[in-house]
Amino acid sequence: MKEPILVLPMALILTCLTSQNAQGHDHGRPQKSPESAPKNERTGRNATRFSVEVMVLHATHNKKPNQTRQIDPRIGPLPELAKEPFSLYDHYVLLDRQLLPLVRDNPKSVNLPDGRVLRMKLLQVLPHDSLRFSASINRPGGKDFLPLLAVKARAGQAFIVAGQSYQGGILVLVMRVVK
Amino acid sequence: MQIPSRGQDRILVKEPSDQKLMLLYDGELSPSEELRIRDRLPENRRSRQVLSGLEAVGDAVRAWGEVRGRAGDVIADRVMSTIQASPKPRRKRTWATTAAGSLALAAGIALAVARLGSTELQSGWRTPLLSSSPQPLASQSANQRPSQRREETNAAIELVDFGSRTGTIFMVAAGPNVTTPVVWLVDEPSTQRASPESL
């Protein structure tokens, strides 16, 4: 008859521990039941659902007069290229396209054609599928090109970093948040 | 009853504004509106002069860029000069990070916080208002910055450190009510750049 007496307190202790975890007190571990966690916690847990698509474009001018404007069809629809100052370049070629998953405390890097490195880091997950993340561009062991850029964006929104000199033209980095 | 001739009838029509003509030059008008304005060009001397002036400026800039072989600088200078020519921000004392010779920029301390409430420039670009005072990200929530709410349809540049380079932030239209923020940096020492006045 001693066994049931010991089992009952053990069961109570286990129940208490389980309910504490379900309420989200353990911030360091992934939640097994996100529905029971507070809203902010849920968005933080879901950070890996977001990625940033990075397109590296090379913009150049016509070498011969009367050449028509050419935009690499792999770039897809990008109306910004038809607006100044991007419209001042005649050729756009897609050099690279990468999808970087945004994970907190796990910066992602992209090697750029000019030897520099684009580094992106998730800073904060906000409500309504909104993110705050940072980007920087530098050359390993060299001078920073863009030490820091902090951006707030939602899925589908884009921003552009342009101006790096590369092979007679410039690099245009188009970054878009995807979910 | 006297029926006005074709020419007399059109003289009474209002001339297109300079902004319309710039949009026409940039190819940003709707086909019907472009046709309407072009149809009246033969009778509208002033509009023809404005358009030819725009074309001349464009040709000169391109020619100058080809001569120098550094068209990138031309574009960068145009970006900078456009920003410098923009109206003063209304809310607080601000400065655009276009001071090529600025010691502050050269020291690499240029931190600019892009504000929303953008100011439309003549060229059609939109430049965010810039603040010289850096603001920590951690204390900036959407509720604390009500001016951001109306631009939530677009990505927002919240903080930029240009380091020792010259750069600027502006907005480019990507569709109806959609603009894309652009960070443009000059990838050469500012001392080698041509001044905008030389254009």
Image (cartoon, coloured by chain):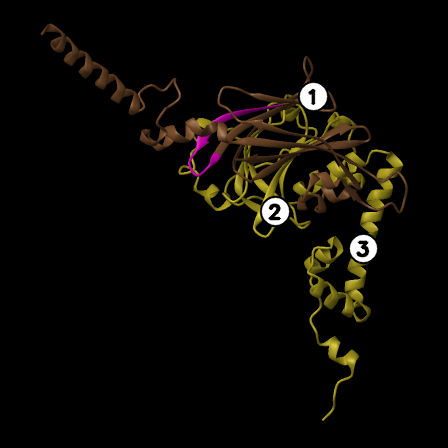
Chain colours: A brown, B yellow
Point out which mark residue B61 bears: none
Disc 1 is placed on an element classified as loop
Q: Residue furthest left?
A: A1
**Tag 3's secondary structure?**
helix
* In the foreground, A168 or A69: A69
Residue A129: in magenta span: yes
Amino acid at the residue labelled 3: Gly
* CA–CA distance in space, label 1 to label 2: 35 Å
- As measured in the structure, the alpha-carbon distance from the residue carrying label 2 to the one carrying label 3 is 23 Å
Q: Residues within 10 Å of mark 2 (few under 14, many from 20)?
A: few
Q: Is residue A167 within the magenta segment?
A: no
The residue lying at 19 percent from left, 15 percent from top is A11
Name the residue: 84% across, 48% down: B59
Q: CA distance from mark 1 to mark 3?
A: 41 Å
Report which residue position mark 1 lands on.
A116
Q: Quadrant of the image for the N terminus of chain A?
A: top left
What residue sits right under mark 3 in the picture?
B53
Query: Looking at numbered disc 1 in the image, what kind of residue is underneath it?
Result: Arg
User: Which numbered disc covers residue B87?
Assistant: 2
Q: Chain of mark 3?
A: B
Q: Position of residue A50 (x, y in %)?
A: 51, 31
Q: Which residues are magenta?
A: A119-130
Q: Is residue A69 above or below residue B52?
A: above
